């Protein structure tokens, strides 16, 4: 993509004529407020980011090192932790640096790169959550065929499919977005390069971009949610047929935690990308964005894994948890 000829700003020559010159950078306006507010937000975001990084790194390390966790479910959980780690790291080091900077600038290429990887990781996670629900469906509803159906090669293909879907969506969204002209202003009303504020910033007609965003994001969200709901509908029926009360309670507890995390992720993403008019509410969008780009990646290790008995035992075996 020739980014320099597509992103332009206005320049006034000595003869009074206006011409287009390449736009070199954007300015991320971030959150409003004085020095005290900025310092408080910096401390809060830094604490949340560090917890997210440590939690997800711990999960990746534990699942990798403990042979007893080398199963399809934990293979998918490790990939989820990797996505959450990348998801937050694409955004928050730059956002944290901007709290301490007066310029808050990001190069045009840096903005496009951040947007590409953010979009790819987010889309991949949506697909992966549906695959995780499918994995639980097979484990509970078809246990005799589970090890054959979810063999290592099948798991690898499913995860590769998730990343491929994320890559294709991100490539399309990035190409459409950064082919728009940006010469009315270079100030992005957000703390990272996200799609709605970029569309609002463009001086061209963005109807096609918004339609593509609404259709593709809506299709991905609705499609993966349906996959999750169908999987858990079958799981619920199977659990209710069990004679063991303890077994039902354990499975309902596990599924409940998963559905809580899924609801938080899909709910916030839907509010931001898959409803008409989502582009218009930038201030609300910032808060929603913090939730699904930082709070959820921070919570996922606890929701999915760190309260899991097998993971706790693995932590004790590795000497990372007190007995």
Image (cartoon, rainbow, N blue to C red):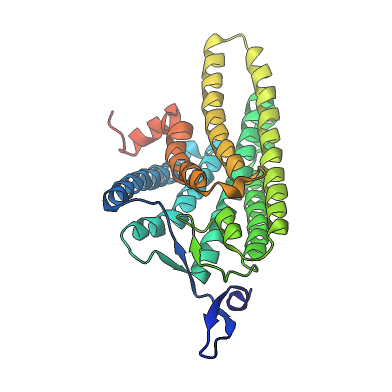
Where in the figure is residue 289, as x and y percent of width and height? 50, 46
Residue ID at (62%, 70%): 181
| Depicted 228 relative to depicted 189: above or below | above
Marker count (numbered)? 0
Q: Quadrant of residue 233?
A: top right
Quadrant of the frame with the C terminus: top left
| Depicted 314 relative to depicted 144: above or below | below
Hey, which residue is sitting farthest front in the picture? Answer: 16
Where in the figure is residue 134, as x and y percent of width and height? 66, 34
Residue 152 is at least partly visible in this image: no
Pick the residue in front: 9 or 213: 9
Q: Taking 63 as reference, is 147 left or right? A: right
| Depicted 184 relative to depicted 188: above or below | below
| Depicted 319 relative to depicted 118: above or below | above
Residue ID at (59%, 73%): 7
Q: Taking 98 as reference, is 217 left or right? A: right
Quadrant of the frame with the N terminus: bottom right
Q: Quadrant of residue 3?
A: bottom right
Pick the residue in front: 82 or 47: 47
Q: Taking 38 as reference, is 237 left or right? A: right
Residue ID at (53%, 46%): 79
Where in the figure is residue 9, as x and y percent of width and height? 55, 75
Pick the residue in front: 184 or 297: 184
Residue ID at (71%, 49%): 216
Pick the residue in front: 181 or 292: 181
Residue 206 is at least partly visible in this image: yes
Where in the figure is residue 108, as x and y percent of width and height? 52, 70
């Amino acid at each position: 993509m020739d980014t320099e000829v597509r992103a332009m700003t206005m320049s006034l020559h000595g003869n009074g004529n206006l011409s287009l010159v390449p736009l070199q950078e954007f300015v991320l306006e971030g959150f409003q407020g004085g020095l005290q507010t900025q310092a408080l937000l910096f401390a809060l975001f830094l604490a949340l980011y560090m917890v997210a990084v440590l939690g997800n790194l711990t999960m990746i390390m534990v699942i990798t090192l403990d042979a007893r966790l080398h199963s399809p479910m934990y293979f998918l959980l490790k990939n989820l932790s990797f996505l959450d780690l990348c998801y937050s790291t694409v955004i928050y080091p730059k956002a944290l640096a901007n709290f301490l900077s007066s310029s808050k600038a990001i190069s045009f290429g840096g903005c496009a790169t951040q947007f590409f990887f953010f979009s790819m990781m987010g889309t991949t996670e949506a697909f992966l959550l549906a695959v995780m629900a499918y994995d639980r469906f097979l484990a509970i509803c078809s246990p005799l065929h589970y090890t054959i159906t979810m063999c290592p090669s099948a798991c690898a293909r499913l995860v590769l499919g998730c990343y491929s879907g994320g890559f294709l969506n991100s490539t399309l969204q990035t190409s459409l977005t950064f082919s728009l002209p940006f010469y009315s202003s270079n100030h992005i009303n957000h703390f990272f390069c996200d799609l709605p504020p970029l569309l609002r910033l463009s001086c061209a007609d963005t109807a096609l971009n918004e339609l593509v965003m609404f259709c593709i994001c809506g299709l991905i969200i609705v499609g993966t949610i349906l996959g999750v709901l169908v999987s858990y509908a079958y799981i619920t029926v199977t659990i209710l047929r069990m004679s063991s009360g303890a077994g039902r309670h354990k499975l309902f507890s596990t599924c409940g935690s998963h559905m809580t995390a899924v609801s938080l992720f899909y709910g916030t993403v839907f509010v931001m990308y898959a409803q008409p008019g989502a582009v218009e509410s930038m201030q609300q969008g910032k808060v929603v964005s913090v939730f699904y780009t930082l709070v959820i990646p921070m919570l996922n290790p606890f929701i999915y894994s760190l309260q899991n008995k097998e993971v706790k035992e693995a932590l004790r075996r590795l000497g990372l948890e007190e007995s």
